[in-house]
Amino acid sequence: MSWSRAVTTPDEARAAIADPGDALDLRAAAALDRAWADLGFEPAAPGELARPVDVGLADLAATRRLGERLAGELRPGDLVVLSGPLGAGKTSLTQGLAAGLGTSGTVTSPTFVLARAHRGPLPLLHVDAYRLRGAGARALDLADLDLEDALEDGVVVVEWGEGLVEQLSPSVLTVELSRPDDGDRPGRTARVRARGPRWSHRTEVTAP
Ligand SMILES: Nc1ncnc2c1ncn2[C@@H]1O[C@H](COP(=O)(O)OP(=O)(O)O)[C@@H](O)[C@H]1O
Ligand SMILES: [Mg+2]
């Protein structure tokens, strides 16, 4: 199972987009010009572009499987931000992450407690920042959670964390979950992005 696939030319990128295999994103060592931008590549780390691959999640089990798969890529100090509307599957994905990390305790939505720590070979701090987004929220609440400390030897996963916690680390794994517009259709989609230097060395990008 690979995290990402390195591409060196836009033609190679087109072929990989048509048949992404099990790679979660496509990486290129290149300057961002029109050809790459048109193909959906974005700056991901210094000197590196990446194109996230959307993952279809047909059912709850698929959401959990994606979480388990991502868990296999995580190292101490990794920050994961989950976004998407209420019911999009953020907590379900975290359940898969926790299973993949081998942590103890049941993962439930920490909306009212804000954060819950799960012990394991790679400790997981699961945060739900929903209550910290509103007008009445205090910036202090986030500081109270001591996320830096949790990041020292474990993984921090933050639901509703976009725009709130990115300053904690220059490297962030983001998963944007969405529900189909047509409410009658089942399933979800996930867009995974791995940005920042911590992720560069885990990919196989080679200079063209
Ligand atoms: N891929 C999926 N297809 C259909 N239902 C899903 C999928 N993933 C999760 N769910 C369901 O969506 C509901 C809300 O999930 P949850 O993880 O609590 O969302 P969030 O934390 O984003 O609010 C749960 O009932 C869960 O079973
Ligand atoms: Mg939730």
Image (tube, rainbow, N blue to C red):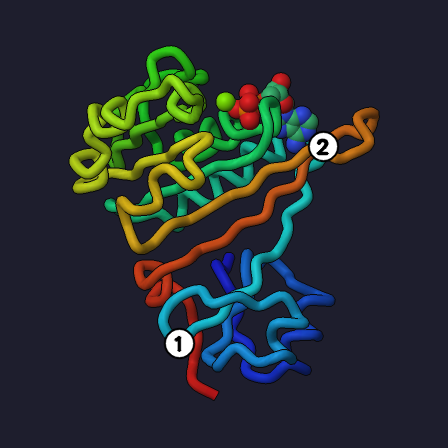
User: Circle 2 sits in a helix, a strand or a loop, which is it?
Assistant: loop
Q: Earlier in the sequence, mark 2 or mark 1?
A: 1
Inspect the image, locate mark 1, and give the three-letter code of the amino acid beneath it.
Gly
User: Circle 1 sits in a helix, a strand or a loop, which is it?
Assistant: loop
Horizontal relation, residue 172 to residue 37: left or right:
left
Horizontal relation, residue 28 to residue 73: left or right:
right
Q: Is residue 94 above or below residue 78?
A: above
Residue at mark 1? 47
Q: Quick check: can you spot residue 60? A: no
Q: Quick check: can you spot residue 204? A: yes
**Quarter of the image where one finds residue 188:** top right
Residue at mark 2? 187
Q: Nearer the viewer, residue 61 or 84?
A: 84
* CB under 8 Å between discs 2 and 1: no
Which numbered mark, 2 or 1, is in the foreground of this view?
1
Residue 37, image x and y in percent?
61, 72
